[in-house]
Amino acid sequence: MVQLFRHEVSRFAVVGGVNFVLSLVIYYGLLRILHVHHLLALLASWAAGMVFSYVANFTWVFKPEEKLRFRDRFAKYLAASTVSISLNLLSLHALVKFAQLDPFYVQCALIPLIVAFNFSTAKFWSLKKEKA
């Protein structure tokens, strides 16, 4: 049980790292190069990262089933991700607006909290293996 948990955490970290780079590149490009508003840039990078991470976490990390499914499990994953991004957006907005901090660095600082939330919801809810 502990070994499986470590295995899942390790693989989740790899997927998260790749997702972080993918999302960060998209966020940075939209924010700094295309001058898209920081909240829209975050939503776009989140959407791309969510699809990537769902597929990778389903097929490589948690493997709740043999075949990749987008019906009910994706709806749960999307719901958890929506809560996650909502909390992220609210935090980012508040820290940028009221503390007048740089949105790029604020988002970088929020990442560990978001990762912990996302792992928990995937492991124990949206991608949880069904008991036989």
Image (cartoon, grey):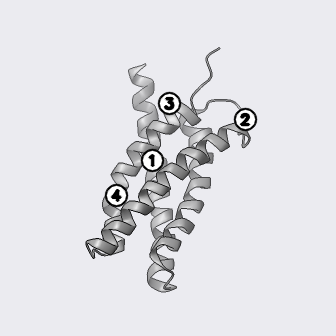
Which numbered mark, 2 or 3, is in the foreground of this view? Answer: 3
Q: To which residue does mark 1 refer?
A: 14
Q: To which residue does mark 4 refer?
A: 110
x, y percentage for residue 5?
A: 42, 28
| Amino acid type, residue under disc 1 in the picture | Val
Of the two numbered discs 4 and 1 on the same chain, state the one appearing first in sequence.
1
Q: Quadrant of the N terminus?
A: top left
x, y percentage for residue 43?
A: 54, 66
Q: CA distance from mark 2 to mark 3?
A: 19 Å
Q: CA distance from mark 3 to mark 1?
A: 19 Å
Secondary structure of residue under mark 1: helix
Q: CA distance from mark 3 to mark 4?
A: 22 Å
Tell me if mark 4 has few (under 14), some (14-19) or many (20+) residues whose alpha carbon lies within 10 angstroms of its own: few
Residue ID at (62%, 54%): 51
Of the two numbered discs 2 and 3 on the same chain, state the one appearing first in sequence.
2
Of the two numbered discs 2 and 4 on the same chain, state the one appearing first in sequence.
2
- Side (left or right) of 84 relative to 56: left
Q: Is the Cβ of the residue at disc 1 closer than 8 Å to that at disc 2? A: no
Q: CA distance from mark 1 to mark 2?
A: 21 Å
Tell me if mark 2 has few (under 14), some (14-19) or many (20+) residues whose alpha carbon lies within 10 angstroms of its own: few
Inspect this view and state whether residue 106 appears: yes
Residue ID at (42%, 45%): 13
Secondary structure of residue under mark 4: helix
Q: To which residue does mark 3 refer?
A: 124
In the figure, 107 relative to 6: above or below?
A: below
Residue ID at (45%, 47%): 14
In the figure, 59 relative to 66: above or below?
A: below
From the viewer's side, name the closer residue of 51 and 100.
Answer: 100
Find the residue positioned furthest to the top.
132
